[in-house]
């Protein structure tokens, strides 16, 4: 098996994964701190700038976009970047809204990018029945001959969903988990993403050999940051898996 893929984290949900000769960017968010409308008359507040400028990233082969409807997953500068990327993989509805090079994938549908297979996997952005309010979301699994298995969760709060993915692809070599315990008033502050304890349990379910958390800083509605992640993984006996940037 080839070397562990490099993962650079730039704040919020944005990470660059170098895998199988490809450079894959997750949920691009580069806007400055401030209040950003989320489409229902409410705002999400960004508290920190990203740690990279799109112009400095170099060539991107594809964007893995969990969903396009919330500014903490795709912001204005992120949308501008999509115009210069040869392929954006996202939800079916998102591809219709974005147009351009966006391609929608249903859960369990795959696309071949050279030697790499990108498979869309389910994600549940809140409690059961929340999709009409929060929209459609997708995660991704990366595989290929002689390559490690990489899971990108997207905005998922459900361990039952993680179990389904583990049944098909586990054990996972690298899990890029969207954590942070995101909560807003739209669903009475129910979890919209994994909190720290659920992220640790997801790692156990996946049989993950390495966990790179994203989506735990830079936004006010992310309720658990670095220290809760460290504590939860330590309590689960999984501290050695965790790579926090």
Image (cartoon, rainbow, N blue to C red):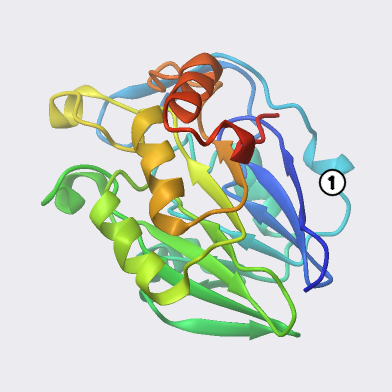
- In this picture, residue 73 sits left or right of residue 243: left
Q: How many C-alpha atoms fall within 10 Å of the one at disc 1: few (<14), some, or many (≥20)?
A: few
Q: Report the number of numbered marks.
A: 1
How far across and down, in percent of the image, does residue 237 sit? 48, 33
Q: Nearer the viewer, residue 175 or 85?
A: 175
Which residue is painted at 32% across and 37% down in the image? 39
Query: Vertical placement of 240 versus 159: above or below?
Result: above
Q: Answer left or right for 202 relative to 89.
A: left
Residue 155 visible? The answer is no
Whether residue 190 sits left or right of residue 144 in the image: it is left
**Split into 4 quadrants, where in the image is the N terminus?**
bottom right
Q: Looking at the picture, does residue 161 appear above or below residue 177?
A: below
Q: Residue at x 28, y 24 (%)?
A: 42
State the image quarter where residue 96 is shown. Answer: bottom left
In the picture, the quarter occupied by the C terminus is top right
The image quadrant of residue 45 is top left
Q: Is residue 145 above or below residue 133?
A: below
Residue 46 appears at what percent x and percent y? 51, 19
| Between 94 and 215, the one nearer to me in the picture | 215
Q: Is residue 188 left or right of residue 192?
A: left
Q: Position of residue 161 (x, y in %)?
A: 29, 59
Residue with the mark numbered 1? 57
Give residue 121's quadrant in the image. bottom left
């Amino acid at each position: 098996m080839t070397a562990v893929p490099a993962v650079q984290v730039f704040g919020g949900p944005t990470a660059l994964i170098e895998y199988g000769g490809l450079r894959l960017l997750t949920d691009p968010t580069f806007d400055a701190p401030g209040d950003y409308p989320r489409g229902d008359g409410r705002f999400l507040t960004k508290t920190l700038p990203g740690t990279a400028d799109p112009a400095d990233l170099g060539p991107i082969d594809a964007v893995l976009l969990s969903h396009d409807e919330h500014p903490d997953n795709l912001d204005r500068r992120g949308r501008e970047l999509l115009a210069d990327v040869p392929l954006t993989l996202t939800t079916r509805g998102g591809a219709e809204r974005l147009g351009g090079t966006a391609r929608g994938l249903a859960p369990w549908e795959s696309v071949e990018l050279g030697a790499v297979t990108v498979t869309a996997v389910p994600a549940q952005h809140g409690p059961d029945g929340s999709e009409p309010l929060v929209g459609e979301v997708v995660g991704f699994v990366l595989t290929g001959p002689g390559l490690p298995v990489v899971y990108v969760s997207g905005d998922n709060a459900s361990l039952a969903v993680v179990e389904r993915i583990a049944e098909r692809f586990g054990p996972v070599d690298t899990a890029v988990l969207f954590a942070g315990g995101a909560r807003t008033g739209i669903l009475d502050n129910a979890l919209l993403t994994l909190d720290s304890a659920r992220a640790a349990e997801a790692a156990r379910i996946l049989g993950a050999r390495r966990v790179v958390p994203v989506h735990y800083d830079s936004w006010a509605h992310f309720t658990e940051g670095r220290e809760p992640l460290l504590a939860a993984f330590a309590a689960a006996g999984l501290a050695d898996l965790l790579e926090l940037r």
